[in-house]
Amino acid sequence: MAILPHLFIIIENQYLKNTIKPISIMRRLIFLVAMCLCIFAQATNPEWALYGVNATRPFKNGRALARKDGQSGFIDSHGKPVIPIQFRSASDFSRNAATVTTVDGRQGIIDTNGKFILEPGNYDISYLEIEPDVKSGYFKVKNKETGKYALSDGQRFLTDFIYDYVDFRRYPFVDLSSRGSSQRGVMNVLTMEYFPKEYAVEYGNLGIKVGNRLFSFDGEPLNVKDYYISSNGSEVFQDKISKLYGIRNSRTGAVLTPAKYKLYQPKIYSMWRNGVVEMYDSISPEMKSVYVVFDENGKEIYRQSQKNITANVESEWVKVYDISNFSDYSKHKYYDFKGNEIKELAGQFWLPVGEGIYRSATNDLLYLRNSNKILNNVSTPQLSDGMITYRNPSNNMYYILNSKTAKIMGPFSQAWRFSEGLAHVEKNGVKNMFIDRNGNEYRYPDNIRINDIMFSEGVIAASDRNGADGYLYNPLGHEGWVYNQTEGQIDSYAMGNLINEARTLFDQKKYAQAMDIYYRLMMLVPDEPASFLNYAACLYNLGYYDQAITAAEVALEHWPDNTDASHLRQISIAAIKEEKARAEQQQNTDAQRSSSSLIWDALGNFANTLMQMSGVQGTPYQSAGFGSYDVDAGSTAGGGNYLTMYRNWERRAEQCYNSLTNLGSSVTSRTGKKSGASGHRVSSGNYVQMKRTFREAQREMRNLRHKANQAGVNIQKSRWEDATVGY
């Protein structure tokens, strides 16, 4: 069969006017949507979630910052502008709130619908960060006229404008203070509880201490009584006569340590941490009190032995230092909770990076408690997803360390933090590469440029070689985040790129690849026949004649005078008759049936889109083959045209069933709604429509069997006629 000439039609419309440049030859494929015949299987193929949108910032709370003509707004997960591009600048969303600056320089806070939570005013608004680049969703708001700050949770003001400093001391506690004033304290932003004249300090591995109160690291109040008895039943007790403290067995009353010690803040200092407790010797001849640490058996594991030297229990050890010169880190010593000095840590001031991970405040050292290793040349370590990204100052290269296994990956010319299982790295001049926790590398094609440093909500901002912006799915999976680009939400530049690319592929006879792009073009601009007719031409050249007929008939319903659609239908019918005349019974392989299934679904989706676009009422168009073309009823054995039509509907019912159930699996959207999953990613929005199509196919099968029976033709009932979907 001769190859059908290309049916490309130039349509003058808002996407093409003044935007299409002359078609460049032999361009590589830049945009592949795995809707129909996906020919690649590598994990790093560019699977676009959105394409041709004016946004390059990460998605947060289902919104992404978009810019155009120097102004900012937001798009949603459909690529649709939901907050108009009207602000001079805007921040990313966090806890459903974002800061914006109006064109006249006033700042305010909006919600995800664009409604002002804080009306624009003469403010300077900034996020409070839990750690670098990790926003808390709380804001410090400065009144530019008075220079004073207030605290806001994005919904309301939590304080008045009376503070000079508003900063996180230890999340979720915010430090509030003023110069030369007793107006200071901390607020728990989760409970809105205010503690005047107090500090929030980390109390070992238990939580955060504020005065005599103890809180978890999530800000929830802890019952200190739960920590008064150690794991083996020991407790601190007070002698009723001397009022001094010792240690005893809480069950038997047996004294383990005599009551001759004092406690600072008994409600706090009588609690056990990692099997130890702190007390003070009240009868020291040289000093009024001596700091002592006991284990839960009452054994003394550390005693302060020198004047001006003090100590305190931290999460992993007892830290000893010179109270008169704390900044002299050379005198710092560390003891484990058995009383043994950890000599490797001496002479350094260790700051926590994460659980069991510490960095030196003065040297490029990193300590891993689990493996008891100290690593050299570790600068600016950042912990994320259990992985530590750091720079080696000796060679200015970057490395990634698994905090549990101590395995080091690298070197990289650049590396960022992990997010959603991957870290963005640059290696050997390659800038579009990612690495997972096991060291596996994921490289995107050279025609893709990554525009952000981390995946967020299943996607990352990227652009193609022509400069069209969009968002790529995480190759490891997007965990329920669904991006469904609605019709028309693509800029004209990207639209021109797709059209040029599809035409080049078609001219190179790469019909399967061209068909993928034409399908996306149909979905984005469903009121133009060019892409749909070219899609049908790809079907014809791939040998899917019956689907090409259906595609042509769909086109003729909406564009009745289109001569190309009529011609395509006629030559497709002729091709089928020619095959039948030669008695060549086409036997599809499993792979061909699978490909055909995907094509039928694509045709059905597009037909339904056309119906919605044109406002046509009634049952959505079914693209399963209606037998409307002229086929001799006697040319098909065992039932003629009735059987042919019945088999077409049977195939449609089977395809819908498999798409809805995918062998029993299901997908849950972000809203919690369960729906069927399919190999070509049927969105949850199409789920109800697909079930309706499934029932329609079954109804047509029953009607055809009844009509065939009346005509004296017996059609054996298919199991798909009564199949059901459980959800």
Image (cartoon, grey):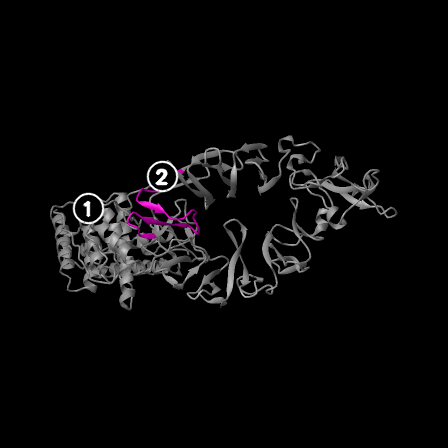
Q: Residues within 10 Å of mark 1 (few under 14, many from 20)?
A: few
Residue for point 68% across, 32% down: 341
Q: Is residue 578 above or below residue 700?
A: above
Instruction: Examine the rendered structure and indicate whether residue 339 appears above or below residue 446.
Output: above
Q: Let me know if residue 539 is in the magenta part.
A: no
Reading the image, the residue beneath label 1 is 25
Q: Is residue 558 left or right of residue 399?
A: left
The one nearer the camera, 354 or 238, is 354
**Is residue 419 something that shows in the picture?**
yes
Q: Is residue 462 shown in magenta? A: yes
Q: Residue at x 50, y 40 (%)?
A: 387
Q: Are marks 2 and 1 in contact (CB under 8 Å)?
A: no
Residues rendered magenta in the picture: 441-469
Amino acid marked by disc 2: Val
Q: Quadrant of the C terminus?
A: bottom left
Q: Position of residue 362 (x, y in %)?
A: 58, 38
377, 400: nearer the viewer: 377
- Tell me the residue that label 2 is attached to: 430
